[in-house]
Amino acid sequence: MHEYKAIAEYSSLSAEQFFNQLAPAQQPLIIRGFAQKWPLVISAQQGPQSFVNHLLKFYQGNKARMVVAPPSANKRFYYNEQMTDVNYLSGEERVDLFLGRLLELMDRAVYPAISMQNARLSEILPGLAEENRSDFFPALEPRLWVGNQGIVSTHYDGSDNLACVVTGRRRFILFPPEQTCHLYPGPLNFTPAGAPTSLVDVNNPDLERYPLFQHARDAAYSAELGPGDAIFIPMLWWHHVESLDKVNALMNYWWNGSSAPDAVSPSAIDSLNLALLAMRDLTPKQRNAWRCMFDHYLFKQGVDPCAYIPAQQQHILGKLSPDYIRAIKDYFIQKLQK
């Protein structure tokens, strides 16, 4: 069993401390007991049936996205062996039927991994978010994830993420963004769950096939969370998530990135795809020259370009009005149509 680095833990934090002092450092952290007073967490502590009953109080009949992986998938939602498709089925189902199935599978020795993923509470369980509101996110709608024992392979989010376990236990393994080249990321445009996924099985890595993964594992962090605990996963930190109990649930908040409610398109991953399209035929030296341009204008590794250009001539480098953003998008629509 590999010994991972420990993630910094806090037992209490104010929203001001978190957003002003800690989150800007873009390092993962754990807040123990973050949601211990939520009625949903308190109800779940009385058992799986109590947890399900609490959810159903808010249910009004809408369907949500579900995924099912057969026992042969070993609880891992991933690609199939030929990498021509994924190893699970997905579709929409009534939430009450899904929850009933979740309870039914608890007594099975062999069972599929099932999960309700990325559900908007306002659409399927209206009122639940208001009952379990966080001072950290007074106006941000959380997403709900419910399932049995399952593994979401190592991936990253385009936004900062605070994930809170509401029932069951979850294990998180986190890799810093600079370990990307050691994680053997899969395709950008064909992914198991919407985000690029590492091809390495963290629990059983094939180091002959993926030898550089050893570097990523040496730099990785891990923690196990119980009901009410929350973990901050900064934008672009790779994370492997494993649900350890036969009834698990998590609520998470995305902000400050491509998943944020006020995010401006295109997303960062869209921009990466466009850059790959535009620069794919350049030589290594030419690409390195463009790296210098990106370092200057986008990543601001030296002098801030806005520091010496008059405000009225900063254009896309400076503050953008909605009209200017629209004009930029129209410009690229015309360019991409050629």
Image (spheres, grey):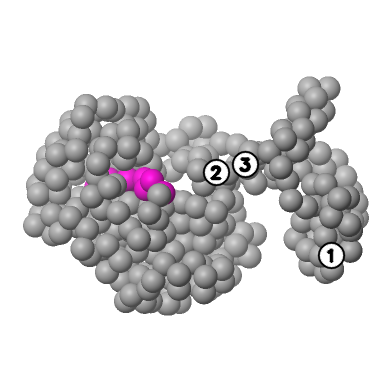
**Element under disc 1:** helix
Is residue 217 visible to the viewer in this orientation of the structure? Answer: no
Q: Residue 24: which disc?
A: none
The picture places residue 214, in percent across and down from the top left corner, at 55, 68
Gap between marks 1 and 2, in whole Å? 27 Å
At label 1, the amino acid type is Ala
Relative horizontal placement of residue 217, taking residue 253 as reference (left or right): right
| Residue farthest top in this picture | 338
**Element under disc 2:** loop
At label 3, the amino acid type is Val
Residue in the picture at 39% in, 71% down: 14
Which marked residue is nearer to the observer: mark 1 or mark 3?
A: 1
Binning the other alpha carbons within 10 Å of mark 1 as few (below 14), some (14 to 19) or many (20 upward) gives: few
Pointers 3 and 2 in contact (C-beta within 8 Å) = yes
Residue in the picture at 33% in, 58% down: 134
Q: Earlier in the sequence, mark 1 or mark 3?
A: 3
At label 2, the amino acid type is Asp
Q: Residue 264: which disc?
A: 3
Residue 236 drawn above or below residue 276:
below
Quarter of the picture holding the C terminus: top right
Is residue 161 visible to the viewer in this orientation of the structure? Answer: yes
Q: What stretch is highlighted in magenta?
A: 140-148
Residue in the picture at 37% in, 73% down: 13
The picture places residue 121, in percent across and down from the top left corner, at 31, 40
Q: Mark 2 points at which residue?
A: 262
Quarter of the picture holding the N terminus: bottom left
Q: Name the residue under label 1.
A: 307
